[in-house]
Amino acid sequence: MSHRDRPAARPGRRSLLAAAGGLAAGLAGSAAAAPAVADPARAGGPGGPGPFGPAAVRPGDPRYDALLLGDNQRFVGRPEEILVAGSTAQVVRAVQAAVRSGRRIGVRSGGHCFEGLTADPAIRLLLDLSALDAVGYDPVRRAFEVQPGATLGRVYRTLFKGWGVTLPAGGCPEVGAGGHLVGGGYGPLSRRYGSVVDHLYGVEVVVVDRDGTARAVVATREPDDPARELWWAHTGGGGGNFGVVTRYWLRSPQADAEARSAAPDPGRLLPPSPAHMLERLVEWPWDRARTTERALTTLLRNFCAWHERNSDPGSPGAGLYAVLRLNHWSATGFSMVVQIDADLPGAAALVQDFVDRVNAGTGLDAGGGGKTVPWLYPMTWPGNGEAGDIITRRYKGKAGYLRRSFTDTQLATVYRHLINAGGNPECGLLVVGYGGQVRAVEPGATAVAQRDVVMKAVYHSVWADPGDDAANLSWVRELYRDVYADTGGVPVPGEVSDGSYINYPDVDLADPAWNTSGVP
């Protein structure tokens, strides 16, 4: 299974529609031959502010409880110390001190994790990287620098306003770049421009040598870089597995020639940002008389079949991104969001044809509407549209890559669970368009191995009351197990599936009670 413990993007209401984007003390042995990196000062001019931090927050400090909270309130740790770092040098010192004292480290940037990986009771030092949030152009490396605490919204705004460029990252603006990038993040522009790691030029990461010495190294994709394997590991290997990332550099491979020119134009080093986005929201009511098994499975099969036929790199359909959200029947309805660069030739016609093909033969009335807006607006709107009290938000998410449509048996299983009595309005299945330019990269070129898939499936449940944990966990776990019943309850790579998405960690994949496939 394609799974490791790592930070991940949230499966919230807005991000699921738009995007559907613990480190142990043993960091030893990473890139021992790589050169050390000096920590650039972040001080202001004369009389200006100096670099932030570090801020050490311990139990009893009025800031402690607030800093404990991540996005998923199922998990709250109790570390001895939360250290908010503001520079690479501070991270090096913190890691060194933890190694010497034998304290386990947890690393958090945005805090959007499906599991309790940074709230594990064994973690004694929680290293908070949210203050490491710089975004800009580095003229020395001739690439864009993004620090791990920068949210995706901040990244998009800065790249757009400064240079008119962007990244094919997630659609949830509050997710931190730290875990999202290293896990091979994806989003509304990935079918057009590939995975976000396809544009990763280099990474600065704090590692621990075999002798227990912590230091920062830089690893790039340059063929002669002695730390190139460390760069490769960060192109989809998952957050927290190789060290503490303190800086990313991003430049598209096709822009390397421009970067080597005497005066490179930064506006040509990453994909251009769209000027406008055409978004279409399609809505169907849950009418038990009309939303029959045949109707719903036909709709889901149509969605998948379109992606099977329209996900080649460079194909006209590769510019279209769609998310089908099938809510539990108690939600009263389900929906689909379609997004495309409004200035692409034939964009509106392509969207209409897609909607017609998805709805064909269902007998269902597709409502909703469309609008064209400046691209930056929906990509950076603050918050995530979560309903209710976010302080009590709890969720469980599970994932699976799709090479082609679900089988008829799987489609029937999905319908059966969507109409059972155990779910709530926030339970359901999302099927997310993928493929396109992602498929143009060889599987071994990056650590994102699933390059021939055309969709991602996300199984989820969201709730507020801790007393509802057992029921909601059972609902989503049983749906997932039954969909993959023929392969031991998990999406074993094969004709239909290709494992799980590393940025959506799921501890059940390592639990023999839920994974009987024999595949680790």
Image (cartoon, grey):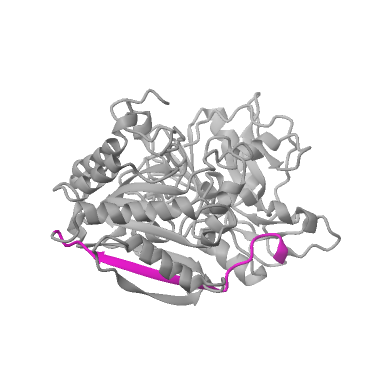
Q: Position of residue 246 (x, y in %)?
A: 61, 47
Q: In the rendered structure, which segment of residues is drawn in magenta?
A: 267-288
Q: Position of residue 245 (x, y in %)?
A: 59, 44
* Vertical side of 406 occupied by 2: above or below: above
Q: Is residue 335 left or right of residue 85?
A: left
Looking at the rendering, in which quadrant would you find the N terminus? Answer: top left
* Vertical side of 446 occupied by 362: above or below: below
Tell me which residue sits at (22%, 57%) in the image: 425
Residue 287 is one of the magenta-drawn residues: yes
Q: Position of residue 264 (x, y in %)?
A: 79, 62
Compare residues 37 and 457 and report the one nearer the observer.
Answer: 457
Q: Position of residue 427 (x, y in %)?
A: 25, 51
Residue 304 is one of the magenta-drawn residues: no
Q: Is residue 68 left or right of residue 24?
A: left
Q: Residue furthest right?
A: 262
Determine the image quadrant of residue 5.
top left
Determine the image quadrant of residue 355.
bottom left
Residue 173 visible, this angle: no
Q: Residue furthest front?
A: 361
Q: Is residue 287 left or right of residue 125?
A: left
Tell me which residue sits at (65%, 40%) in the image: 231
Figure disc tally? 0
Q: Is residue 4 left or right of residue 155?
A: left
Looking at the rendering, in which quadrant would you find the C terminus? Answer: top left
Residue 342 visible, this angle: yes
Compare residues 519 and 387 and report the one nearer the observer.
Answer: 519
